Amino acid sequence: MIIQYETQKNDFYLEFQPIIHVLPEGKYDMTHFEVLLRSRQNHRYPEDLLDFYISCEERNHLLVDWYAGQLMVLCEKYPQYTFNYNIHPQQFIYESTWRYLDQLKDYSKQIHIEITEKLVPVDFAVEGVSFKMETFIQKIHGLSYKVSIDDVATGQNTLELVMNNIDCISSLKLSLLSFNNLDVETLGLFLDAWQSLAQKHGIKFIVEGVESQEASEKLFERGIVWQQGYYWAKSVEL
Protein backbone atom coordinates (compact mmCIF):
# COMPACT_ATOMS: atom_id res chain seq x y z
CA MET A 1 0.00 0.00 0.00
CA ILE A 2 2.87 2.39 0.82
CA ILE A 3 4.29 1.80 -2.69
CA GLN A 4 0.93 2.79 -4.16
CA TYR A 5 0.93 6.01 -2.13
CA GLU A 6 4.51 6.77 -3.19
CA THR A 7 3.54 6.32 -6.84
CA GLN A 8 0.71 8.80 -6.50
CA LYS A 9 2.95 11.24 -4.64
CA ASN A 10 5.44 11.15 -7.52
CA ASP A 11 2.73 12.68 -9.68
CA PHE A 12 3.24 15.95 -7.78
CA TYR A 13 5.52 18.77 -8.81
CA LEU A 14 5.90 22.42 -7.78
CA GLU A 15 5.39 25.65 -9.66
CA PHE A 16 6.15 29.15 -8.47
CA GLN A 17 4.26 32.39 -8.93
CA PRO A 18 6.03 35.65 -8.06
CA ILE A 19 4.65 37.96 -5.40
CA ILE A 20 5.58 41.36 -6.81
CA HIS A 21 6.65 44.41 -4.82
CA VAL A 22 5.59 47.27 -7.08
CA LEU A 23 7.84 50.32 -6.96
CA PRO A 24 7.41 53.85 -8.38
CA GLU A 25 8.10 54.67 -12.03
CA GLY A 26 7.10 51.26 -13.32
CA LYS A 27 9.81 49.38 -11.44
CA TYR A 28 9.28 46.29 -9.31
CA ASP A 29 11.09 43.73 -7.16
CA MET A 30 10.66 39.98 -7.68
CA THR A 31 12.34 37.89 -4.99
CA HIS A 32 9.26 36.41 -3.28
CA PHE A 33 7.35 33.40 -4.66
CA GLU A 34 4.30 31.36 -3.75
CA VAL A 35 4.88 27.60 -4.00
CA LEU A 36 2.03 25.92 -5.90
CA LEU A 37 1.34 22.18 -5.92
CA ARG A 38 0.56 20.70 -9.35
CA SER A 39 -0.25 17.31 -10.87
CA ARG A 40 1.75 16.05 -13.84
CA GLN A 41 -1.42 14.46 -15.25
CA ASN A 42 -3.25 17.72 -15.93
CA HIS A 43 -0.86 20.44 -14.65
CA ARG A 44 -3.50 21.71 -12.25
CA TYR A 45 -3.92 21.88 -8.49
CA PRO A 46 -4.68 18.26 -7.45
CA GLU A 47 -7.33 19.00 -4.82
CA ASP A 48 -8.78 15.49 -4.61
CA LEU A 49 -5.37 13.86 -4.33
CA LEU A 50 -4.23 16.37 -1.71
CA ASP A 51 -7.38 15.68 0.32
CA PHE A 52 -6.53 11.98 0.10
CA TYR A 53 -3.03 12.57 1.51
CA ILE A 54 -4.10 14.80 4.38
CA SER A 55 -6.90 12.49 5.51
CA CYS A 56 -4.65 10.49 7.86
CA GLU A 57 -1.30 10.68 9.64
CA GLU A 58 0.37 7.96 7.55
CA ARG A 59 -0.23 9.63 4.19
CA ASN A 60 0.32 13.15 5.51
CA HIS A 61 3.78 11.99 6.63
CA LEU A 62 4.60 10.92 3.07
CA LEU A 63 3.40 14.24 1.70
CA VAL A 64 5.26 16.51 4.12
CA ASP A 65 8.42 14.42 3.80
CA TRP A 66 8.32 15.04 0.04
CA TYR A 67 7.69 18.75 0.57
CA ALA A 68 10.55 19.03 3.07
CA GLY A 69 12.99 17.59 0.55
CA GLN A 70 11.75 19.91 -2.19
CA LEU A 71 11.92 23.04 -0.05
CA MET A 72 15.39 22.28 1.31
CA VAL A 73 16.72 22.02 -2.24
CA LEU A 74 14.98 25.26 -3.24
CA CYS A 75 16.26 27.25 -0.28
CA GLU A 76 19.81 26.07 -0.80
CA LYS A 77 19.71 26.64 -4.56
CA TYR A 78 18.06 30.08 -4.34
CA PRO A 79 19.19 31.73 -1.08
CA GLN A 80 18.14 35.13 -2.46
CA TYR A 81 14.46 34.09 -2.70
CA THR A 82 11.65 33.76 -0.18
CA PHE A 83 8.97 31.08 -0.59
CA ASN A 84 5.35 31.03 0.60
CA TYR A 85 4.42 27.43 1.35
CA ASN A 86 0.70 26.59 1.69
CA ILE A 87 -0.55 24.38 4.50
CA HIS A 88 -4.13 23.12 4.80
CA PRO A 89 -5.39 23.73 8.38
CA GLN A 90 -6.23 20.04 8.74
CA GLN A 91 -2.53 19.20 8.52
CA PHE A 92 -1.79 20.97 11.80
CA ILE A 93 -3.48 18.12 13.64
CA TYR A 94 -0.76 15.66 12.62
CA GLU A 95 2.54 15.20 14.43
CA SER A 96 4.30 14.68 11.08
CA THR A 97 3.52 18.27 10.05
CA TRP A 98 5.18 19.65 13.16
CA ARG A 99 8.19 17.35 12.80
CA TYR A 100 8.59 18.64 9.27
CA LEU A 101 8.31 22.28 10.31
CA ASP A 102 10.86 21.69 13.06
CA GLN A 103 13.15 20.02 10.52
CA LEU A 104 12.92 23.05 8.21
CA LYS A 105 13.29 25.79 10.83
CA ASP A 106 16.91 26.43 9.80
CA TYR A 107 15.38 27.80 6.59
CA SER A 108 12.66 29.81 8.35
CA LYS A 109 14.04 33.12 7.04
CA GLN A 110 13.24 31.93 3.51
CA ILE A 111 9.99 30.07 4.15
CA HIS A 112 6.71 31.79 4.96
CA ILE A 113 3.91 29.49 6.11
CA GLU A 114 0.76 30.41 4.21
CA ILE A 115 -2.37 29.12 5.94
CA THR A 116 -5.13 28.39 3.46
CA GLU A 117 -8.76 29.27 3.98
CA LYS A 118 -9.91 25.64 3.75
CA LEU A 119 -12.38 24.47 6.37
CA VAL A 120 -11.77 21.34 8.40
CA PRO A 121 -14.74 18.93 8.17
CA VAL A 122 -16.86 19.08 11.31
CA ASP A 123 -16.69 15.30 11.68
CA PHE A 124 -12.91 15.19 11.32
CA ALA A 125 -10.99 14.42 14.50
CA VAL A 126 -7.75 12.89 15.72
CA GLU A 127 -7.78 11.24 19.12
CA GLY A 128 -6.30 13.45 21.82
CA VAL A 129 -5.97 16.52 19.56
CA SER A 130 -8.28 19.52 19.59
CA PHE A 131 -8.45 21.84 16.62
CA LYS A 132 -7.49 25.32 17.81
CA MET A 133 -6.25 27.48 14.96
CA GLU A 134 -4.98 30.20 17.28
CA THR A 135 -2.75 27.71 19.09
CA PHE A 136 -1.36 26.45 15.79
CA ILE A 137 -0.57 29.97 14.55
CA GLN A 138 1.24 30.79 17.78
CA LYS A 139 3.22 27.56 17.54
CA ILE A 140 4.31 28.31 13.94
CA HIS A 141 5.35 31.81 15.00
CA GLY A 142 7.30 30.29 17.89
CA LEU A 143 9.35 28.25 15.39
CA SER A 144 10.48 31.59 13.84
CA TYR A 145 8.44 31.24 10.65
CA LYS A 146 6.56 34.20 9.21
CA VAL A 147 2.83 33.50 9.03
CA SER A 148 0.74 34.53 6.03
CA ILE A 149 -3.07 34.27 6.07
CA ASP A 150 -4.35 33.34 2.62
CA ASP A 151 -7.67 34.48 1.11
CA VAL A 152 -8.76 36.64 4.04
CA ALA A 153 -12.52 37.07 4.46
CA THR A 154 -13.19 33.60 3.01
CA GLY A 155 -13.50 30.16 4.60
CA GLN A 156 -11.92 29.93 8.05
CA ASN A 157 -9.70 33.00 7.51
CA THR A 158 -12.08 35.51 9.02
CA LEU A 159 -11.44 38.97 10.41
CA GLU A 160 -11.89 37.48 13.88
CA LEU A 161 -9.12 34.92 13.28
CA VAL A 162 -6.82 37.66 11.96
CA MET A 163 -7.42 40.01 14.88
CA ASN A 164 -7.03 37.26 17.49
CA ASN A 165 -3.58 36.46 16.06
CA ILE A 166 -2.44 39.79 14.64
CA ASP A 167 0.82 39.82 16.62
CA CYS A 168 1.87 36.52 15.02
CA ILE A 169 0.96 37.43 11.42
CA SER A 170 3.39 38.94 8.91
CA SER A 171 1.14 39.21 5.84
CA LEU A 172 -2.48 39.05 4.70
CA LYS A 173 -3.52 37.93 1.23
CA LEU A 174 -6.80 38.77 -0.50
CA SER A 175 -7.84 37.42 -3.89
CA LEU A 176 -9.78 39.70 -6.23
CA LEU A 177 -11.19 36.57 -7.85
CA SER A 178 -13.11 35.75 -4.66
CA PHE A 179 -14.96 39.07 -4.79
CA ASN A 180 -15.52 39.66 -8.51
CA ASN A 181 -19.27 39.94 -7.89
CA LEU A 182 -18.80 43.18 -5.94
CA ASP A 183 -19.26 46.50 -7.67
CA VAL A 184 -16.12 48.60 -8.13
CA GLU A 185 -16.95 51.10 -5.38
CA THR A 186 -17.71 48.45 -2.75
CA LEU A 187 -14.63 46.44 -3.70
CA GLY A 188 -12.52 49.57 -3.33
CA LEU A 189 -13.82 50.21 0.18
CA PHE A 190 -13.25 46.56 1.06
CA LEU A 191 -9.63 46.72 -0.12
CA ASP A 192 -9.06 50.01 1.71
CA ALA A 193 -10.28 48.48 4.97
CA TRP A 194 -7.89 45.52 4.78
CA GLN A 195 -5.05 47.75 3.63
CA SER A 196 -5.67 50.10 6.57
CA LEU A 197 -5.68 47.16 9.00
CA ALA A 198 -2.40 45.86 7.61
CA GLN A 199 -0.73 49.26 7.75
CA LYS A 200 -1.87 49.86 11.30
CA HIS A 201 -0.19 46.64 12.43
CA GLY A 202 2.89 46.92 10.22
CA ILE A 203 2.23 43.84 8.09
CA LYS A 204 2.11 43.23 4.34
CA PHE A 205 -1.17 43.29 2.44
CA ILE A 206 -0.91 41.24 -0.76
CA VAL A 207 -3.64 41.30 -3.41
CA GLU A 208 -3.89 38.24 -5.66
CA GLY A 209 -5.79 37.82 -8.91
CA VAL A 210 -4.23 40.87 -10.61
CA GLU A 211 -4.83 40.15 -14.28
CA SER A 212 -4.35 43.49 -16.08
CA GLN A 213 -2.15 46.56 -16.09
CA GLU A 214 -5.21 48.69 -15.27
CA ALA A 215 -5.96 46.64 -12.16
CA SER A 216 -2.32 46.81 -11.07
CA GLU A 217 -2.17 50.58 -11.50
CA LYS A 218 -5.43 51.15 -9.61
CA LEU A 219 -4.16 49.05 -6.72
CA PHE A 220 -0.89 50.96 -6.67
CA GLU A 221 -2.83 54.23 -6.52
CA ARG A 222 -4.51 52.89 -3.38
CA GLY A 223 -1.13 52.17 -1.83
CA ILE A 224 -1.32 48.41 -2.44
CA VAL A 225 2.22 47.66 -3.56
CA TRP A 226 2.29 43.87 -3.03
CA GLN A 227 0.57 42.15 -5.95
CA GLN A 228 0.27 38.70 -7.48
CA GLY A 229 -1.48 37.36 -10.55
CA TYR A 230 -1.37 36.52 -14.25
CA TYR A 231 -0.64 40.12 -15.24
CA TRP A 232 2.75 39.78 -13.60
CA ALA A 233 3.49 36.17 -14.44
CA LYS A 234 1.93 32.74 -14.66
CA SER A 235 3.35 30.10 -12.38
CA VAL A 236 6.46 28.34 -13.67
CA GLU A 237 8.90 25.67 -12.55
CA LEU A 238 12.23 26.96 -11.25
Image (cartoon, rainbow, N blue to C red):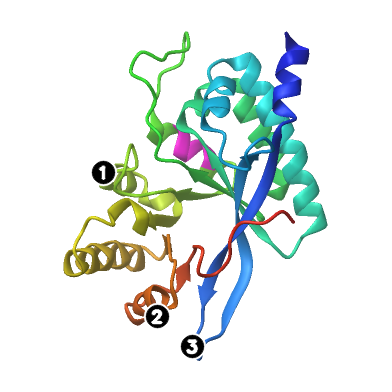
How far across and how far down the image is residue 141, in percent? 52, 44
Residue at 35% over, 63% down = 198
How far across and how far down the image is residue 19, in percent? 55, 64
Q: Is residue 5 above or below residue 88?
A: above
Task: Pick the residue in front: 223 or 144.
Answer: 223
Residue at 38% over, 55% down = 175
Q: Is residue 25 above or below residue 143?
A: below
Of tags 2 and 1, the one toward the viewer is 2
Q: Which numbered tag is attached to residue 24?
A: 3
Q: Residues within 10 Å of mark 1 (few under 14, many from 20)?
A: few
Q: Residues within 10 Å of mark 2 (few under 14, many from 20)?
A: some
Q: Which residue is mark 1?
A: 160
Q: Residues within 10 Å of mark 3 (few under 14, many from 20)?
A: few
Give the main secondary structure, helix, strand or loop, of the magenta stretch. helix
Residue 98 is left or right of residue 134, and the answer is right
Cα separation between marks 3 and 2: 11 Å
Q: Give the mark, 1 or 3, whose residue is nearer the N terminus.
A: 3
Which residues are the magenta region?
136-140
Q: Which residue is mark 2?
A: 217
Secondary element at tag 2: helix
